Every structure is written in C-alpha cells, then in structure tokens.
Image (cartoon, rainbow, N blue to C red):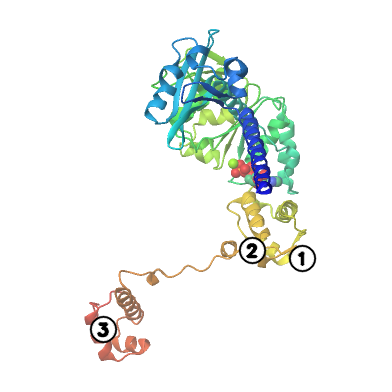
Amino acid sequence: MERADHIRMEELERGNDTLKKENQLLRTILDAIHESIFVVNEKDEIILYNTESEKMEGLKRKDILGKKEDDVYAQPYYFSAEVTKKILQTGKPMIEQPYWYNLNDGRKINMIFSAFPFYYQGEIAAVYVIFRNMNQIGDFIALTLEMQKKFIREEKDQQTRAPYLLDDVIGINSKLNRIVIEARRIASRNSPVLIVGETGTGKELFAQGIHNASLHSKGPFIPINCAAIPDTLLESVLFGTVKGAFTGATDIPGLFEQAEDGTVFLDEINSMSFSLQGKLLRVLQDKSVRRLGSKTEIPLECRIISATNIDPVTAVKEQILRSDLYFRLATVTINIPPLRDRNEDIRILARYFIKKYSVQFGLFINDISAELLHFFEQYHWPGNVRELENFIEGAMNFVQNEDRILGLHHLPEYFRERLFPKKEVPSTLTLKGTLQNTLLETEKQLIKTALTQNKGNITKTAQELGISRQNLHYKLKALGISGNISL
Ligand SMILES: Nc1ncnc2c1ncn2[C@@H]1O[C@H](COP(=O)(O)OP(=O)(O)O)[C@@H](O)[C@H]1O
Ligand SMILES: [Mg+2]
C-alpha cells in the first residue's frame, strides 16, 4: 500500500514537472511574439501581461499583475469600462476592432484588438486580449511604401538603361558597316537622327548604340513607340501635364522633360497624327516644351532619335508624315538594309544567335548546317534579324545534348511551314454550308469548267467527265446549269 502511494506521488511530481515546463515554454513564446497580450481573470484582475505589452505601454509586469484594471489605468479606460467587463458578462468575443486610448503619461496608442472569453469547466474563467500597435503598423506601411518607391525607381532605371553599344551590331555587309561608322561619327553631335528600316532590322539597337556613344550617354534613354499609344495620351506623355489641364490631370513631367540630358527615341514616328506631328515640330524648332495646360516654357535638353519602318519619302508623299517635320528629324538619316539584301550576314548572325542560346540553354551547338543555311538564304525574312533570332531560339529548344550542328530537323513545324510555304489550297475545297451542299457546288463548278473548256459540246464534256450524255443532261438540269455556256 505504502509503496503504491509512493509510486503515485512520483508520477504526480513527474506530471507536475512536465506542466511547469510547458507553462514556462508558453510564457517564453508569449513574450517573444510581436503582439501585446493581456489577460484578466473572472474577477477582472490582470493575470498575464507579456513583454510586448510592457514595451507598448511602458509599464512593468511586476507592478500590475494581480491588480484590477481600474487601479492600473487612468479613467476612463476602454478595456475595464467596456471590453473585458462586457465579455465577462456576455461571453462573446470581439474581433479585429480598432481603438485608441491615452496612457497615464499622456501618450496616445492606436491599436487593433481582438478579445476572447476563456471557458474553464463551463464557466468564463478569463478574458484574453490580443492587440497590435497601429503606430508600429503605420511605420511598417511607410517602410513598405518607401520600398515600393525604391522598386519603381529601380524599374525605371532598368527601363531607361540602354544595354546595346554600336559594337554590338553584328554583320559584315559593307553597307551595314558604313552605317556603323557613320553612327559613331554623328553620335557626339546633338542633331536629330532618323533611322529608317523594316521591322527587326535593328533600329532600336542603333538608337541605343548612338545614345551610348554620345555626350548624352550618362542621361536616360527613353524609348516610346508612337504606334502603341493613342494620340491624345501620347501628347500628354511626351509633353507632360499640369493640374487642371483636363479633368483628373496632375502635375506630371513629360518624357522630353524626364529625359533631361538623355535621349528620347520616338519609334514608329509615322504613326503619329498630323496635328501632333505639328506640335512636335514646334518643340524641336523652339527647343522648348510646354506641359499641357501650362504657359511655362521648359528648355529641351535631350537628344531626339526617331525611327520609321516605312520609307519616309513615300510617307511624305502619301501625307502620312509632315514634310516639315521630316526635314527637321532627318538632319541625319540612317537607312538599315533589310536582312534579305545582306545575305552574307545571315550566316554570321545565325552563328551568333546559335552561340548565344547554346550558352543560355547549356548546349554545345556551335554551327549551322549547310542545308539549313541554304534555306535561310532563300527565305525573304519579313521580320528581319528579330525573326532570325526567333527561328534560332525556337530551333534550339529541339536540340539534343549530343548535337553539335543546328539542322533543318531542329526547326519546329510552324517554322518549316514559313520557310517553305505550301501551295494555296483551292478555295472550292472550303466547306460551303453542309457537306452535301459543298459537294453539289464543287460538282457544279467542275461541270461548268469542263463545259467551258469544251466550248459547250455536250458529247466531249461528257467524255471528259467520264459520264454518259444522258447523265450529263440530267445533272445540268438538276444543278441548274445552262447548257449555253458563255465563252
Ligand atoms: N545587326 C545586328 N546585330 C545583332 N543583333 C541585331 C542586329 N540587328 C538586330 N538585332 C537584334 O534583333 C532584335 C530586333 O532589333 P530591334 O533593334 O528591336 O529592331 P527594330 O527596332 O528595327 O524593330 C534585337 O534583339 C536586336 O538586338
Ligand atoms: Mg523596334
């Protein structure tokens, strides 16, 4: 008997020990978290007050534990007056409520709290309140906003960075090389440059190259595609606005202003409306910009490079491009020949892109097969260098680890179809209504053609079609074809 008691005592003590340990662990955790925790018992005496609460209210746990809320806090105090007492009465929690109160030393605390009843053996034994200091959250939001601004600035830096140099222009074509030399020569001057070339010929590459070789290279490079933005918006984007210029307008600098000592690249200038072209001309002539709705003239400090993918002389003739603006923009004109006119560059560029994607994809391809090169040299490259790069990138996805040469078999089907376009499918073979109708329509067309070719001779037509004369007569009637085919 005695022995059994002894064992029970040991068990109890061991259990007690475990409880103590767990209790201590929980208190340690409660002191480590960033929310204030405050607990009162059923007699409204404070029984738990964590470290975050001490920090927030500037009170010491040892001074308030066991005391009533009303004795600790200046009146009127929210928790005593409303929350804890109310919950002790109603047994209902309050979730995510905003509130503020003044501490004894006059400091104001903004917070959001949740308060819950704690039931023990069916009775409310305590109320626990968890709250977050909104002053801290305010700091947190300010920090987040600051980070967002920093991110936007970095994004903008990325956008206004021009990675390409004139050295990056690849090719051995003599015309192209002359353009590179010319671009280097004119880069250091401030005059406007007009770059003419089909899509994908490297207009932007040249624009960046000129910017980076110019006195404006420290400033931003700001490209804008005039075709991508509606005209009214383009105007405010280029020139900027002042508050009140139109409903909702705010003070925003335009791209010309933002470019400061950099370069504005006006891509697809031919897409700009005539009236906006006129306004642009005035800016270039006056060397100053006025924001929409403003009278203040801001000096134009940036270099203007523009580009068009249609021949500017034709564009002027067709009244797409104002001639006065054209002469102003084209102080220096650079004409980039299309890829099909510089066959010798196809191999050079193909090998260049093959190496680029080989490195990027971790492959070991270093050349192009003679067969594939042959097809590349026959192709007309409507998308120019950009299209060639897309072809190679696409094909490199079908390369095996052991491959060393890029061949025709690596080209995906849709690229092969582009390289060797199929003969057009006769339009008579498209479905016209139901299958039955289509068949009848096709039969009718074939009979008509045969009749015409045989000058309306029924016997010969029937022979050619491999049917009897009677059958042909029947079909002509049934299909509503007149026997007198006009020739
Ligand atoms: N001569 C070239 N050497 C190297 N890359 C080129 C060359 N021409 C064009 N590219 C590349 O082809 C792509 C299209 O060029 P881009 O300058 O955007 O053409 P565009 O502005 O005329 O449409 C870009 O990735 C560019 O780097
Ligand atoms: Mg472009």
Q: Locate residue 267, reporting x and y percent.
A: 56, 36
Dot 1 amino acid type: Glu
- Numbered label attached to residue 411: 2
- How far is the residue under mark 2 from the one under mark 3? 49 Å
Q: Residues within 10 Å of mark 2 (few under 14, many from 20)?
A: many
Measured as percent of width and height from the top left, residue 294 is found at 47, 14
Disc 3: which residue: 475
Q: Choose mark 2 or mark 3, whichever is in front.
A: 2
Q: Amino acid at mark 2?
A: Leu
| Callout 3 secondary element | helix
Left or right of 449? Residue 159 is: right
The spot of residue 198 in percent (x, y) is 58, 46
* Residue picked out by circle 1: 402
Quadrant position of residue 477: bottom left
> Which quarter of the figure is the C terminus placed in?
bottom left
- Would residue 18 appear left or right of 133 to someone viewing this image? right
Q: Nearer the viewer, mark 3 or mark 1?
A: 1
Residue at disc 2, secondary structure: loop
**Residue at 66% of width from left, 63% of height from top?**
398
Q: N-terminal of the two: label 3 or label 1?
A: 1
Q: Are marks 3 and 1 in contact (CB under 8 Å)?
A: no
Residue furthest to the top in view is 105
Tag 2 and tag 1, C-beta contact below 8 Å:
no
Q: Amino acid at mark 3?
A: Lys
